[in-house]
Amino acid sequence: MVALRDKPVFLQPGHNAGDLVEAHKWKVLREERGIVEVDAHLPKHLLNPRDQLFGGFHGTYVDIMSIYAARSMSNDADTFSWSTTINMRIDYFAPVEGDRFFLMSEVVRNGGSTLLVSTTFTDSEGCKLAYAITTIKKEK
């Protein structure tokens, strides 16, 4: 199932992490079971003095995207109503800069109570900027 739409991704306005990265303004490019891709803008308040995404904020993007991809694995929202990030590793290849960038998260392994999710940051030319692996624990 592929969806192209302008609507909030995972978090509606009013959630601290989602509001920080302005997730409600992201455009969903692809949404399937275990996969989500978005076109995200780079808010000015997240920039470092070099006009790049401050490294500490990458984890917020990764967490939101990983949880969204993990939740897409469930057919019934009631069976996966909460999750906890139990591990996250981010590798930085190049700075995230400019007005827009792209995020793609994919469930690499569904282990039952935990999921391993990869998240990739790319620029408009498709160059990889950062790569993350996250372990998500599903909770009811």
Image (tube, rainbow, N blue to C red):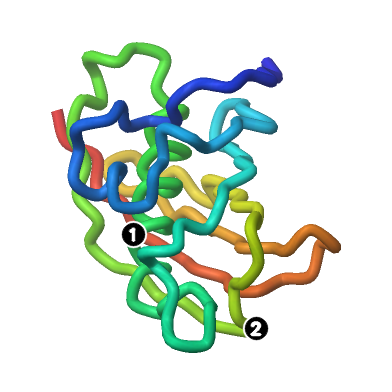
Q: Residue at x 30, y 27 (%)?
A: 12
Q: Residue at x 34, y 12 (%)?
A: 76
* Front-most of residues 20 and 63: 20
Q: Residue at x 61, y 61 (%)?
A: 120
Q: Which residue is mark 2?
A: 94
Q: In this picture, is 118 found above or below 110?
A: below
Residue 82, quarter of the rendered image: top left
Q: Residue at x 52, y 87 (%)?
A: 50
Sort mark 1 into few (<14), some (14-19) or many (20+) by Cα contacts within 10 Å: some
SS for callout 1:
helix
* Front-most of residues 62 and 85: 62
Q: Which residue is mark 1?
A: 60
Q: Amino acid at mark 1?
A: Thr
Task: Name the spot of residue 47 as percent of width and height, x first.
Answer: 44, 73
Sort mark 2 into few (<14), some (14-19) or many (20+) by Cα contacts within 10 Å: some
> In the current view of this chain or complex, which residue is farthest to the left?
140
Q: Spatial distance from mark 1 to mark 2, Cα to Cα?
A: 18 Å
Residue 123's mark?
A: none
Apparent side of residue 136 relative to residue 15 in the rendered image (left or right): right
Apparent side of residue 13 relative to residue 109 in the rendered image (left or right): left
Task: Name the spot of residue 81 as percent of width and height, x first.
Answer: 20, 25
Q: In this picture, is 59 found above or below 61?
A: below
* Front-most of residues 92 and 19: 19
Quarter occupied by the C terminus: top left
Q: Amino acid at mark 2?
A: Ala
In contact (CB < 8 Å): disc 1 and disc 2 = no
First in residue order: circle 1 vs circle 2 = 1
